[in-house]
Amino acid sequence: MFENREDYIKIVEKVEQRLQDSLGSSFDFNVWFILRIQLSYQLHLSYAKGKLVNLSHASNHYFKYLTFKQTLKKIKELVFLIPKLLKYQFFTSFSKKQIILAGYKAHNNESVDNDNNKYLSPFVFEYQDEKPLLYYFDSLEKQNVSFNYLKLLIKWYTLLYQLRITKNSKKKLLDYGGKINSVLEKEIHNSFEDLDYFLADKIIQYLAYKASYKKWLCKLKPTKIISYCFYDNKVNALYNAANLLDIKTNEYQHSAISERHFAYSKWNNIDAIQNHFPSSFMVWNENDEELIAKNFKGIKYGPKVDVVGVLHLKVPPIIKSNENKSILICLQGIWMPKWMENYIQKDTSYNWYIRLHPRYPNDKEKLAILEGLRKPNIFLKEANMLLLNELLQKSKVLITNFSGAALEAHVMGVAVIIYGKEGRESYKSYIDNKTFRFTDNTNEFEKALQKLI
């Protein structure tokens, strides 16, 4: 379907050209940011899978066109919420927070510390005197008064926006998916099933969360928000709400970025959607600094970019041992080349740790075949249970296509081997200056391993 990531990014550019004159909605909202991110993500999943993903199985929780009976029920729910919201708004005191650190609890190391989020922990330490508020998008602790208020707000605004969906607005919201599919039909002779409902649901979710965060932040009055993965729907709703209130928004780089990453490739007409972007980026190296400065530059909008390094991996250099023959492979939802798979199946010299990508698990079936071999030198359970930095500490070499783990491995003193066309393009400068090795056949691969281990 797509030979590389650049192929589907070009499709998204054509979609933008097709929709540029119809990006308003019944909610007076420029939806291009959401459309680009959501479409790109689904195309990336399709690229990894080899076919368009089926969106008919996606759960639509926010986009609801209500019957008269359902409308009355929703109105009653709203009325029931009013006294609770008024209590929090006018009679409940919140502890003011200077800094909010926001992320996903799914990224925490719960075996060590329930609040040890690897991307936020450096800032917990840096701002410990300010006692920052840790907020997880996927978990609102009941005992926190402000989080209880936020939960009520999210319920309130979700109901409110659902009640605002008229026949006219429903048509406009669903029309985006139809127009996008018409471009896909022309360009790749295929289209997403139920793309219209999927995108409409994401738009309503975004609006409900943005309104909730704006009200919540007005009560908390922070001066700064630090998060990561700015293009996540909920993260971005928080950034947008904060930007509207002139609260500083800071983005910490969480993985590799390049021209071929759908969220970091060039943003056209960025000034029209500038509130979606953080006021500053904290990046790992100078190459990423240049990329942000180039691809996120408008006439009015231009983010501050700071090179801070890989903060979450500030550990002593690894002591290399000649006895360490462990190799970590980080997959990208795009299975390894056949020649590499054959090599691993036959090899008895090295210990192989093969790790699935947390968001692109398309390799599960093929990984299960390797597991079925029951080879004593293939460790799949450990590779997918331990944290990345724990795996890197016990590995001599990291092998990947274009995963950001290559940069993290380099910081930890682990040798890196890149494979595949995508990897060669993504890490061209590192390969050219011989920081990373590139292999595309068994002979080169074997020589590289013998040299590095």
Image (spheres, grey):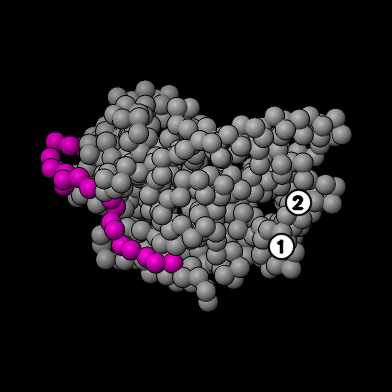
Kindly identify which residue carries mark 2.
173
Q: Disc 2, disc 1: CB below 8 Å? A: no
Residue at 50% in and 63% down: 265
Q: Nearer the viewer, residue 27 or 17?
A: 27
Residue 229 sits inside the magenta stretch: no
Secondary element type, mark 2 = helix
Residue 61 can be seen in this image: no
Residue in the image at 61% along x and 31% along y: 84
> Relative to 360, is 315 on the left or the right?
left
Q: Where does residue 179 sit, x and y in percent of width and height?
A: 76, 57
Any magenta on residue 311?
A: yes
The relative height of residue 196 versus residue 186 in the rendered view (above or below) is above
Q: Secondary structure at mark 1?
A: loop
Image check: 416 left or right of 238? left
Q: Residue flagged by tag 2: what amino acid is it?
A: Leu
Q: Main secondary structure of the magenta part?
A: loop
Looking at the picture, how far across and down is residue 291, in whole percent? 41, 67
Does 111 appear above or below 264? above
Relative placement, left or right, of 393 versus 50 is: left
In the rendered structure, which segment of residues is drawn in magenta?
303-326
Does residue 236 appear left or right of residue 407 in this picture? right
Residue at coordinates 33% horizontally, 63% vertically from top-left? Answer: 306
Q: Residue furthest front?
A: 91
Residue at mark 1: 23
Question: Where does the C terminus fall, quadrant-wise?
Answer: top left
